[in-house]
Image: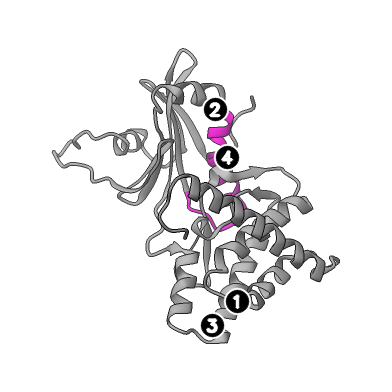
Amino acid sequence: MGPLFCAGDIRRERHGFVTAYFRSELALDKIVCALHPHSLSNGDKLCRETLKRSPKSWTYRVGDWVVKEGRPQHGLGVLKHTLQRGRYRRAWDAACFLFAEGVPTPEPIAYLEYGVLGLIWKNALVVRYLEGFRRSDHYAAGLAEKGASESEIGDFFRCLADAIKSLCAAGVYHSDLTGKNILTKDGRSFQFIDLDAVHLGKEYTLARRMRNHVQLYDTFLEWFPDEVLRDLIAMLALPESDFDAWMRGVREARQRRRARAEAIWRKEGRPEIP
């Protein structure tokens, strides 16, 4: 397994059971303290605001940082974090690489692995908190609900397309390019998150491009008609492609994606399908 990708001046230190990769201008003690519910030296308590919690991870805000921690999963987490450590380091590698390339993504702060004798029971990614940003699909919903002008909606999708092009131009592939993983503050500037889904050095094949376009189309179809989203996909499609055929493929793949999702929702007994 190769070393973690490091952009700029990144340090590696061991602190008890923690192996940390972090920006050299920061103090490791401060980073470790932010991830633990201990009191600070002045007696104050660190305030951690939960942003998202799932069986696999816990994402929370602490001060100017966002932390995504792996969870034990009844012991299964130790096995996963140890045997698939490269997979869990992917977000740190992606954050460092994209930030160095100028692709909009939260500033990487640190990556920590908790373990001993080759066993890892927890990891944590720390990045800069994006003040005032929200999910792009929520922003789009706001545009639709307020009856935004055609020009305003067009500007939103043009800026979104430009941001996505910068991601693709960096030579990476984001396998979950949905509205919840693209944040915006003003509908003009965007930030990519969920970097666990970012793969470095993977060719952007037609199949992967189609997957992304289906994800984007499905995200915004709830708020905007097909003709608006057709313009978005046209900005992202290959110039030499048969766009009418490509767009048919996007619509058909989206229907299959939706059918699979609805089948899962019915199996889980959800009262309403989103």
Which badge, 3 or 1, is on the more N-terminal residue?
Answer: 3
At label 1, counting other C-alpha atoms closer than 10 Å, the crowd grade (few under 14, some 14-19, many 20 or more) is few
Gap between marks 4 and 2 measured at Cα: 12 Å
- Which of the two discs, 4 and 2, labels the residue nearer the N terminus? 2
Residue on which disc 1 sits: 225
Q: Do the residues labelled 2 and 1 touch (CB within 8 Å)?
A: no
Instruction: Tell which tag, 3 or 1, sits nearer the viewer.
Output: 1
Which disc number belongs to residue 245? none
- Residue sitting at x 39%, y 53%: 129
Q: Nearer the viewer, residue 86 or 260?
A: 260
Measured Cα–Cα span from mark 2 to mark 1: 42 Å
Q: Position of residue 234 (x, y in %)?
A: 73, 71
The spot of residue 3 in percent (x, y) is: 61, 29
Measure the C-alpha gap from mark 3 to mark 4. Answer: 35 Å
Query: Residue 155: image x %, image y %?
Result: 58, 79
Name the side, left or right, on which 219 lies relative to 29. right
Task: Write the residue at 49% across / 26% down.
Answer: 81
Measured in 3D between alpha carbons, the distance from the residue under mark 2 to the one under mark 3, in whole angstroms, is 44 Å
Q: Check disc 3 and report the residue beneath it.
A: 152
Q: In this view, does 249 lie above or below 112?
A: below
Task: Tell me if mark 4 has few (under 14), some (14-19) or many (20+) residues whose alpha carbon lies within 10 angstroms of its own.
Answer: many
From the top left corner, tell me how far across and down residue 7 is, in percent.
57, 42
Q: Mark 4 points at which residue?
A: 93
Residue 184 visible in the shown view: no
Q: Give the range drawn in magenta.
A: 86-107
Q: In the picture shown, does residue 242 fall above or below 8?
A: below
Residue 4 visible? The answer is yes
